Image: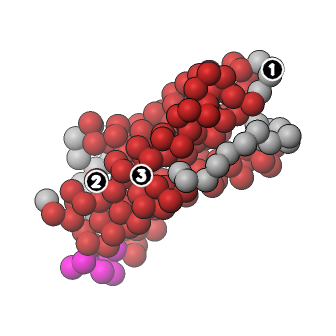
Amino acid sequence: MPIVYIILIGLSLSMDAFSVCLSVGACRKDSHLTVALRMGSVFGIFQFIMPIFGYFLGYYILRKFSPYDEWIASVVLICIGLKMLKDSKREEQCSPRDITKGLALLFLAIATSIDALSVGIGIAVANISIMFFSSVVGFVTLCMCLLGVYFGRTLGFLLGRWACVFGGLVICLVGVKMLFL
């Protein structure tokens, strides 16, 4: 898989975390740098780990269904993209709670990286190093989260929903490409 595709998948997977960070940046009044580093690190680590778990789970599952592995992987990716498109319709508002620390941040990191777990399952059929793939996805997510918190003050409520729409469309297109090529 070419590096361009991996970066596009990384951008797509980071859109959930990016939109959360945009919202946090828009709602926070205190230091954006500390919040950006904390959120970017946690989201990046989870986006790194989850595809690895998904890869090994997918490798085990898809080995059982090898004649249909590319079809299964394509359907998984398309479903993830459609879910991201559906989730982009939710309205987000500022929460009075601090979601940038503790269990709230942990649960957000898990929730935004479930897609990465599913993509890891789909990637199990590709001839690609999962460590390289996960590293790129984690790094892209870290960068996108830093940008999201930083630009959240001015762009948060304008781009948050559209970032998820873009991510969902790219994941769907990758799934369709796997299906037909």
Q: Where is residue 132 in the image (x, y as percent from the top left)?
A: 37, 41
Disc 1 residue type (three-letter) = Asp
Among the two numbered marks 2 and 1 on one chain, the one whose residue lies closer to the N terminus: 1
**Is label 2 in contact with label 3 (beta carbons under 8 Å)?**
no
Q: Give the range drawn in magenta.
A: 62-68
Quote the CA–CA distance across marks 1 and 3: 31 Å
* Label disc, if present, on residue 168 of the rendered structure: 3
The part of the image, by quadrant, that contains residue 20 is top right
Identify the residue shown where x is 61% and y is 34%: 157
Q: Position of residue 39 (x, y in %)?
A: 67, 34
Of 124 and 112, nearer the camera is 112
* Label disc, if present, on residue 30 of the rendered structure: 1
Among the two numbered marks 2 and 3 on one chain, the one whose residue lies closer to the N terminus: 3
Q: Position of residue 147 (x, y in %)?
A: 55, 24
Badge 2 is on which residue?
Answer: 173
Disc 3 residue type (three-letter) = Gly
